[in-house]
Every structure is written in C-alpha cells, then in structure tokens.
Amino acid sequence: MGIKYYPLAPAQSTQHQLATEFGTSQVINICICSTLKMELDFDLLRKCIKDEFNRYECLRIRLSKPDKNGNVKQYIVARDTSEIDFVDLSDKTEKEIDDTLNEWSFVPFSEPNKPMVEFKMIKLPDGYQGIYLRIDHRLADSSAVIVMVNDIMSLYCHYAYGSEFPDPLPSYVEALEKDLEKETKTKKIERDGAFWDEVLSLGEPLYSDVTGTWKLEEERKKYNNPNQRYVHREIKDTRVGFAVFDLEPEPSYKLLEYCLNNNVSMTNLLLMGLRTYLSKANDGQTDISIRNFVSRRSTRLERLSGGSRTEWYPCRTIIEPDTEFLDGIYIIQDLQNKVYRHSNYDQARLAQKFKEKFNQPDHTTYEGMLLTYQPLPVRFQNPNLSGVPYKSKWLSNGTAVQKLYLTVMHTPNGGLQFFFKYQEAELSYTDVQRVYYYLMRIIFAGVEHPDWTVGEIIDRV
Amino acid sequence: MFEEFREMLTEYVDVPAEEIKEDSRFIEDLGLNSFEFMTLLGNLEDEYDVEVDENEILGIKTVGEAVAYIEKLSK
C-alpha cells in the first residue's frame, strides 16, 4: 500500500508558519526533562519508549520536503527504529546539566522525511532518573507530551510491577482526518468567519505594552502615522530570557476556590488580571488585547491521540473602570466561550481578515503578551509511583518568538508557577518582575475585595 | 434524539451512556469544561444542520435542555 500524504492541520500550519517566519524550526522545538527519584531499569525503559512509538502514532509523523511555496505534507511511517541513548549526568553540576540540556534542546529538526522526535534516558544527581525529550511542535503540543510521558510510565509499571496494561491510545490519523474534514465544511467555516467578522466590527484593536504607552508612541513617530494602533514584532533578535515565580499552595488554593465559587475558569481570572495590569500600565486604556492559547481537545479522541492542537486567538476586551472585577471576568468568560465555539478557524484566515479590514502589515501585532494556562500537570498516576518524588521541567529551545509569553502551571506541591519567557531585545528581567508583582496585587485585590471596581483596583495597587 | 445525543456525549465525557440522564448537568455532573461544552454545541450544529444562538446556548445547563433546544431549532 502506498504512503498516504495529508496536508498540515490548521494548528500545525500555525507552527509551520512560525518556523518559516523565523527561518528555523528551532523556534518550535518542545523539550522536557521528566525524572523520578528512583532506580529505573533502563533496558526496560528503552523497551517502553520503543513501544510508545508503536502506540502513539504522532511520534511517527514525517514531513515531506517543502514545495516551491514552502508548504509541506505529512505522512506516518509504519515503524520507527530511532535509537534511544542513555546519558549519565549524575556527577555533573547544575550548570553543566543546564548547558547539556540546552545544547540538546537548541538543535532544530531540519531534514525532511526524517524523525522529528528524540528521546534520551538520563540519570541526574540525587537519584533522579528518567526521560529527556525533544519534539517538533508540529508533532505534539504540551498536552500531547504529557499524555505520552504518562503512557510510557504506565507501560513501565506494567512490565516492572505487573500493573494493568494501559488502554491503547486512539489514532492520530483518525483525529487528523476529522480535523481536515471540518476544513471542508463550508457552512461551519462561514459561521466561524462571521463570528470573527463581528469581533472585528468593533473597530481596530489598540496595542498595549507591558512597559507602557511609549512603545506605540515611538512607532507612531517612526512610521509618521499618529493613528497607528499596532506595533512591529521583533523577528530578528530572538534571544530569550526567563523569569519564573512560584505562588505558594495557600494563596494558589485561594484563587482556585474563588474560581470554583464564582463559576469562572482560572484562564479567565488570569486574563482579567493581565488586562487590568495592561490597562494600569497604559494610562487606564480600556481597550486591551491579549493573545490566549486554546488547546483544542474536547473529545476522548482529541485528548489522547497526540498531535498539535494548540491555537492562539486574540482576547480583546473593552472594560470600563467602573466595572467590578468579577463582572469583568464574566465579560471575558462570555467572549472566551464564543471564541471556543469558533476555535476551528484557521489562523491564516483570521490573519487575512485583520489584514483586509485594518490594513495590518506583516510582522505586526495588537497584543503585548500571550497567555497559556496549563491545567494538566505531568503527574504519574500509576499507584506504583505514588509518593515517588519527581521533577518535570519544560526546557527552552533557546529562542523567544513573542515579546512576552506567560505560562501558568500547577506545581507538585499544589502551588502555581508563573513561567515568563521573553525577548531580551524587548524586555528586561525587571520589566517582567514588575508584571508579576502587579499581576498578583491586582488579582488578589479583585479576589479579596469583590466590591472594588477595576478603576479602584488600578488606583490602589 | 436524546439517545443519539447521549451517544455523542460519550465521546466527550468519561461517563457511561446509561448514566447520562436528561437532568444531568454538563459541567457539574458530566465534568465538561467550558471549551468542551462549546465544542459539543458547535458539533451539534453540524450534526443537525441548525444554527444556534450564542447567547441562548450559554444559558443551557442540562442534557434535557440541550435536546429540547436543538429539537425546537430542527422543526
């Protein structure tokens, strides 16, 4: 039987566009180091990883050579014979380990028709042992990686301790075919398009920068356009900086409880906190846009079949200062629910709409930052591993393609981690520290003083 | 239509079909999050070739209410 070729699904195309725009697929590497504080049988672990290549179809995706327009096709190979190396880093210093992991993580998958995933089995100091993974974002997103790591450890527990053999993982191709079929449903595409037209009918969005109004003012002068409402993105200098802040379990619990009691999601609470910060930093600007990630996984098939299903959609809100904080969250929630319903809409089509409606040039943006809330922790659910200390660290691919990108994750101790990745050409650590400081002050002011309005919060924090 | 809808719902939730009742609430009883709920309603549109009103569907809480709403639109 011949090889069946498929076009990239919309979420994959978004990643492909990024790699094309920045000239290297290094910018779409996803890397994780996931280890347990226990003695592992590495021969057995190697077998489980090899089994995973058979179980998890998306690991066997290959991309064809780009055509003259830069487009690629994908196909699945029947088997993968990649070797799984073992690397002992247990006698290295923290810095040496970081340098080694970085060196691995910065390497792009640049050759067509070749594997785009690499596993290593690693030994770290203090008895931590496990897996290092580098994978191209066109094959998997973070949710897919979490499912896979958990599945490998379920296989390991089956062989090592006799626990139940994990259920088969659903087919990536089946999910892909369903996605591609949606692309042929004209009515649906028209409905989704009509929704975004309605969003755009509010008028051109207005950029707000985490460091204040100067950025837009500078651009207006530079391009001699006092009415300009977007700014240019930095696409040449992708040097990356990180700022990581941990919120303790007790205050984190307080936020989760607030969400539960008020029927709002953590994503929408965070969006409200961030847009209020941006409003404060931009002289009370009421029209604020943030780009929010949507992990398009709703059915069991979508949740467990891997692949890349993450899309970024603008969350634009116009919230007046006399609005109470919780009401602001409800405004965002209402909008986000509508965005979710129309989240099959291809990013390229949406970008085209902005271009046509507002003459938005290439490489420009209305959003000063991006948010991802990752509700799924990397947690080994097998009872044989319960109580075993573990560490899971998402690693940098060495580049930042967005000015400021915040990922909020749950930590093993029940806290929340705020992981900021930023372009060093655009921001400093102190700038990001300020964002976090005010974000916390704003969110807790809103949570603790439900009667305070947005304007009062901006004035008081 | 309830049977069909229940079958479709089992693709979204880890609850056996026989445990899904007309008064089952999407979020509290079946564990759907808002993204899953909105996608489900979007897929219902395709399945039954109807067009739902975004503001009206946000008020739907139970399986029975969703079925009644889609039936009304299908007529």
Image: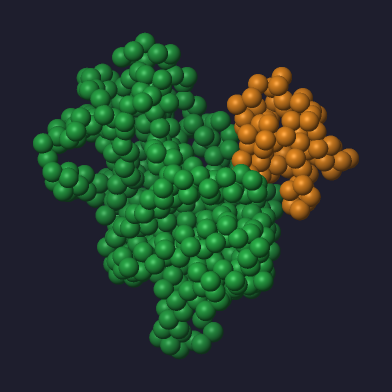
Q: Is residue A105 left or right of residue A445?
A: left
Quadrant in the rendering for residue A151: top left
From this view, report whether residue A340 is shown above or below residue A1: below
Tell me what hue chain A is rendered in. Answer: green
Q: Closest to the observer: A30 or A1?
A: A30
Q: Residue furthest top?
A: A162
What residue is drawn where x is 78% and y is 38%?
B66
Q: What scheme was used to colour the molecule? A: by chain
Whole-percent x and y of residue A391? Answer: 31, 37
Q: Closest to the observer: B64 or A139?
A: B64
What residue is drawn where x is 36% and y is 38%?
A62
Q: Is residue A342 visible?
A: no
Whole-percent x and y of residue A336? Answer: 62, 54
Tell me what hue chain B is rendered in. Answer: orange
Q: Residue furthest right?
A: B75
Q: Is residue A453 visible?
A: yes
Q: Is residue A416 left or right of residue B64?
A: left
Whole-percent x and y of residue A276? Answer: 54, 66
Whole-percent x and y of residue A303? Answer: 52, 34
Q: Is residue A297 left or right of residue A219?
A: right
Quadrant in the rendering for residue A121: top left
Q: Residue furthest left?
A: A91
Q: How many labels were placed on the picture?
A: 0
From this view, report whether residue A137 is shown above or below residue B9: below
Q: Give the quadrant of the N terminus of chain A.
A: top left
